Amino acid sequence: MANRSRELKAYMDRRLERYQNASDRSYVRAQLAMLRRGVGKKPGDLPELWGILFGDLPEEFLSVSGEPTREEWAVYTALTLYALHQQGSEATGPEGCMHRPGRRLGAAARQLVTVEEEEERIARRLQMAATANGIAEAAQHLRGLVRLLRGGKIPLDYAQLAADLYNFQFPDGAARVRLAWGQDFYRQIRQTKEERMEQTYA
């Protein structure tokens, strides 16, 4: 599981880097617009997305059973959420790209908390995704969180999200993902509170 998670993250890093470095901006915009149509759907449901999803997906990630693999679910969900997040911003170039390596979901969600009163509301949204019953339900809750991130222009590591969503589909993996998301969220909260105290008593 760990090796496959790393392979999947590396694949997503390469793919997102291609979007960011593409010279043809209109092509990237068209691809992302198509991907947004797939938000909330199941991998393979929309034939117009087959080429985008399956065109360069490694053979070992592909289903042979007629049901999407864990890899297909993870890549599809991360890509469609990235397209949703990217809406209204320019994907090519570092300034407008909403994929930010190293910005895990819990840390990104924390950036939404601009006043202390918002902490519980944002934490609840993250908890709903973390405790979802399966990948499809998790994707549904993540969609609302991504819309908030888009509104705040807060980027997210979508390669890491894909790896997290892959691991989330295993019982042991889901427990580790939940732990990481919670730690990242409250680590950032704690740091912010400590910084405020230091500023108050400086």
Image: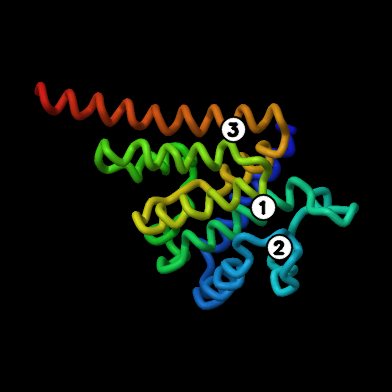
Look at mark 2 in the image and give the residue it sits on: 53
Residue at the top extreme, as displayed:
201
Residue 75 is tagged as 1
| SS category of the residue bearing label 1 | helix
Which coloring applies here? rainbow
157 vs 187: above or below: below
Q: Nearer the viewer, residue 85 or 25?
A: 85
Picture coordinates of residue 107, whole percent (x, y): 42, 38
Name the image quarter holding the N terminus. top right
150 vs 188: above or below: below
* Residue at figure coordinates x 41%, y 66% from the top left: 89
6 vs 98: above or below: above
* Residue at figure coordinates x 90%, y 52% from the top left: 65
Q: Do the residues under discs 1 and 2 have CB atoms within 8 angstroms?
A: yes
84 to the left or right of 96: right
167 to the left or right of 24: right
| SS category of the residue bearing label 3 | helix
- Whichever of labels 1 and 2 marks the residue nearer the N terminus, that label is 2
Q: Nearer the viewer, mark 3 or mark 1?
A: 3
* Residue at figure coordinates x 46%, y 66% from the top left: 87
- Whichever of labels 3 and 1 marks the residue nearer the N terminus, that label is 1
Tell me if mark 3 has few (under 14), some (14-19) or many (20+) residues whose alpha carbon lies within 10 angstroms of its own.
some
Q: Nearer the viewer, mark 3 or mark 2?
A: 3
Figure disc tally? 3
- Alpha carbon separation for disc pair 3 and 2: 24 Å
- Alpha carbon separation for disc pair 3 and 1: 16 Å
Look at mark 3 in the image and give the residue it sits on: 177
Q: Quadrant of residue 119?
A: top left
Q: Nearer the viewer, residue 159 or 152?
A: 152
What amino acid is found at the position of numbered circle 2 in the picture? Answer: Leu
